[in-house]
Image (cartoon, helix red, strand yellow):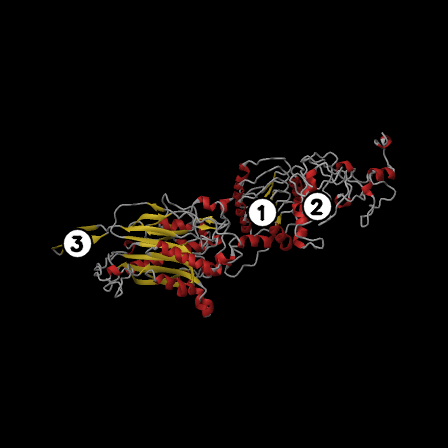
């Protein structure tokens, strides 16, 4: 062989004849603008040096070399897609090159006819099957790769004068890094191991983000899936040549980083939506043709890399990824409009564009009516409880996955109103209603449907100017005016009640923890016009913060204590003598002209109650507490010891010294076979925190409003959305009033026999 004498050089510098390099590789001739030699003087470019690794060799004037370096890492690279590739991608270090090169061997110019297709940088793909890298000149320079996309680095819709902006520079940098990794198995795992050892000691303590105004009412601890502590949160399956992924991987809901790049996956399984903790997902260099709609469930994603696939479009569900900082799409034959949008405006703008232009989609089936008891009843009433998400708290920082027009109050309040009218409950308890919405919208609109309302805002409104006070939220209770008459109503101010209790005045925790929370409850005392039965309806909104479980318990203890006092007072309330419902001259209150001339039914006399707990009691609200908490146990069990874990070592007077108790027998209406899986649904919190409590001695559950179909939720990361105007669900229960048992007897007083009768 002509170069036989040079094939096995000895130690020391060796000098190749320059003419052989030029003759064998004429394209190595210097061009105008080509980078110069690395400056090793008289040493040949291919001469090994004892001062550096033989794998990384001297720079050459090779226009196809990665960053003009001659690294000989790909000499054993496997062929991929029928192409003889022994090179690192041409021009990866030169963003937006638009150059045509002569083939190294003329006979290979048309070796692959499909390689004559024109292409764009965003459809630019390089795939390797080996675990080695290659930065040297290839045997030939193909124009296309195994997915048919061009390797030219021109961006569709972008001319030669396009100056890459910051967004696109970042895109191309990540694409180059991805291609440099190629198919080396577990590349990310090795890389992360090095980085973590270097940076672990230098990792700063994250500073708390500035709270947005009103944000304190909407934050909740992240409890999705109740993920326990894990010693690892990243999984690297890159470079394995896999054509399919076991779905068991998607059961690791604690994962924050998942690498599936440089495989041969043709699809991404929709169950990827289960990994809602993911912040980084890399599926680059596969053969994926479309992203599943469930990709929108990964709302915590900050990086989604899909370089070098076959994506032609993106699902609108990508718009849910409001935390996404980088969407890597280079190397895909993407739709021109989407392509140009991300090139010019970046990831954030594209995500917003997809979100704001998404269609409402197919609405879910109506929530079912669940039957609990179908026995005949003499008196039936229905109750609805709903936290409607106050406009002030519906911020983009909390609900960035919701389109702006859907998050707007004008849209949401109309959907809420229609929902209330459709349910047509006898009693409606709303939380997070501001004064302006109550006065100018709900009270006016619901009056058409025979509702009358009672409202109190949080106590902060007392210290505000009128224009600010009208935006403070509170609790509103509506009732059917033709069915009930309101005998009395009271406001329970938790903070004010606590600091005025003699046993709690001297407690520091009362002033430091309970007093700053200005939550309230509204309690109404109603009487049925026809039957004469009376009812107490409580409507409460309890503090949200998991770090203040003791405050929640104290607020609920005060709520039950005040209702108990009012119940004893109302048990002695005199009979109502003016209970006749108002009737129009031409039509009755239901708008039926056929019954206008019929005489109104005669109201029954008011029922008497011997004690407060005997009066039917319903308490609705957002209690921000789950089953098993101190709040839940206090309500359902009737008592709570003062050393309960939720109270910690706090001091709240007799509540912690002696414990707390109430005289009612309360139960959640949904604590049956119809128990809901959630009442609050957001990306960071899914759980039951809203309740309709009822006194079991006086009321019986008949029907309940069921849950949302699971199939619909499979592609919905959180509420509110087009079909659900609040992040909470409306709860509805239908009750029958139990017949009162009459106990009769006789007694002798001073020799006189007297009969008595008592209702139980």
Q: Earlier in the sequence, mark 3 or mark 1?
A: 1
Q: Residues within 10 Å of mark 1 (few under 14, many from 20)?
A: some
Instruction: Give 344 or 159, whichever is nearer the viewer.
Output: 159
Disc number placed over residue 274 in the picture, else none: none
Location of residue 555 (image quadrant)? bottom left
Kindly state the secondary structure of the residue where label 2 is placed.
loop
In the picture provided, is 24 more to the left or to the right than 185?
A: right
Q: Residue at x 56, y 54 (%)?
A: 353
Q: Mark 3 highlights which residue?
A: 756
Q: Which residue is mark 2?
A: 152
Q: Is residue 72 left or right of residue 372?
A: right
Label 1: state its secondary structure: loop
* The N terminus lies in quadrant: top right
Q: Residues within 10 Å of mark 3 (few under 14, many from 20)?
A: few
Question: Residue 2, how many percent across, how many down?
Answer: 86, 31
Label 3 sits on a secondary structure element that is strand
Residue 33 image offset from top left, x and y in percent: 80, 50
């Amino acid at each position: 062989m002509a170069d036989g004498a040079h094939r096995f050089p000895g130690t020391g510098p060796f000098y190749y004849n320059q003419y052989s390099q030029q003759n064998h590789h004429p394209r190595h001739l210097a061009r105008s603008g080509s980078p110069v030699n690395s400056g090793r003087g008289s040493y040949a470019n291919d001469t090994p040096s004892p001062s550096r690794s033989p794998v990384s060799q001297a720079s050459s004037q090779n226009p196809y070399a990665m960053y003009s370096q001659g690294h000989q890492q790909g000499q054993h690279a496997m062929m991929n897609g029928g192409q003889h590739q022994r090179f690192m991608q041409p021009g990866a270090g030169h963003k937006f090159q638009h150059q045509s090169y002569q083939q190294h061997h003329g006979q290979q110019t048309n070796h692959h006819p499909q390689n004559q297709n024109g292409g764009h940088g965003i459809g630019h793909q390089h795939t390797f099957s080996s675990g080695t890298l290659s930065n040297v000149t290839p045997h030939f320079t193909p124009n296309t790769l195994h997915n048919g996309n061009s390797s030219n680095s021109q961006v569709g819709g972008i001319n030669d004068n396009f100056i890459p902006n910051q967004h696109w520079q970042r895109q191309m940098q990540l694409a180059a890094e991805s291609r440099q990794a190629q198919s080396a198995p577990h590349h990310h795992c090795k890389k992360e191991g090095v980085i973590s050892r270097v940076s672990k000691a230098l990792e700063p303590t994250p500073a708390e983000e500035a709270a947005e105004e009103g944000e304190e009412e909407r934050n909740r601890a992240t409890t999705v899936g109740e993920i326990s502590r894990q010693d690892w949160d990243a999984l690297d399956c890159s470079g394995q040549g896999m054509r399919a992924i076991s779905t068991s991987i998607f059961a690791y809901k604690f994962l924050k980083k998942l690498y599936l790049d440089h495989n041969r996956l043709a699809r991404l399984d929709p169950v990827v939506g289960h990994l809602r903790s993911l912040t980084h997902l890399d599926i680059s260099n596969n053969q994926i043709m479309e992203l599943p709609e469930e990709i929108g469930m990964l709302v915590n994603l900050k990086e989604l890399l899909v370089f070098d696939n076959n994506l032609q479009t993106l699902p609108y569900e990508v718009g849910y990824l409001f935390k996404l900082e980088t969407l890597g799409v280079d190397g895909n034959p993407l739709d021109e409009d989407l392509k140009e949008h991300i090139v010019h405006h970046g990831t954030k703008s594209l995500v917003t564009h997809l979100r704001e232009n998404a269609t409402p989609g197919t609405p879910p089936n109506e929530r079912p009516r669940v039957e609990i008891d179908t026995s005949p009843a003499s008196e039936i009433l229905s109750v609805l409880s709903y936290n409607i998400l106050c406009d002030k708290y519906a911020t983009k920082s909390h609900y960035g996955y919701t389109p702006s027009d859907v998050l707007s109050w004008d849209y949401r309040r109309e959907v809420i109103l229609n929902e209330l009218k459709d349910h047509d409950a006898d009693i409606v308890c709303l939380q997070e209603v501001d004064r302006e919405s109550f006065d100018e919208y709900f009270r006016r609109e619901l009056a058409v449907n025979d509702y009358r309302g009672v409202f109190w805002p949080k106590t902060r409104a007392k210290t505000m100017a009128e224009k600010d006070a009208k935006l403070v939220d509170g609790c509103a209770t509506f009732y059917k005016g033709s069915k009930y008459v309101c005998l009395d109503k009271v406001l329970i101010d938790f903070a004010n009640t606590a600091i005025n209790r003699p046993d709690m005045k001297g407690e520091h925790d009362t002033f430091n923890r309970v007093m700053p929370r200005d939550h309230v409850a509204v309690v109404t005392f109603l009487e049925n016009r026809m039957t004469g039965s009376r009812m107490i309806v409580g409507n409460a909104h309890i503090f949200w913060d998991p770090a203040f479980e003791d405050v929640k318990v104290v607020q609920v203890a005060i709520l039950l204590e005040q209702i108990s006092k009012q119940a004893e007072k109302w048990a002695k309330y005199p009979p109502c003598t003016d209970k006749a419902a108002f009737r129009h001259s031409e039509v009755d209150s239901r708008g039926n002209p056929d019954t206008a001339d019929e005489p109104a039914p005669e109201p029954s006399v008011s029922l008497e109650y011997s004690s407060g707990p005997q009066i039917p009691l319903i308490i609705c609200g957002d209690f921000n507490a789950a089953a098993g908490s101190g709040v839940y146990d206090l309500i359902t069990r009737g008592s709570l010891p003062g050393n309960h874990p939720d109270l910690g070592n706090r001091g709240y007077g007799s509540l912690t010294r002696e414990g707390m108790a109430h005289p009612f027998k309360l139960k959640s209406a949904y604590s049956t076979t119809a128990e809901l899986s959630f009442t609050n649904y957001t990306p960071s919190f899914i759980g039951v925190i809203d309740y309709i409590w009822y006194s079991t001695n006086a009321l019986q559950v008949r029907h309940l409003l069921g849950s949302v179909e699971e199939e619909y939720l499979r592609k919905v990361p959180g509420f509110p959305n087009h079909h659900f105007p609040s992040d909470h669900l409306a709860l509805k229960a239908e009750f029958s009033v139990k017949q009162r048992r009459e106990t009769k007897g006789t007694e002798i007083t001073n020799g006189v026999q007297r009969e008595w009768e008592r209702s139980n």
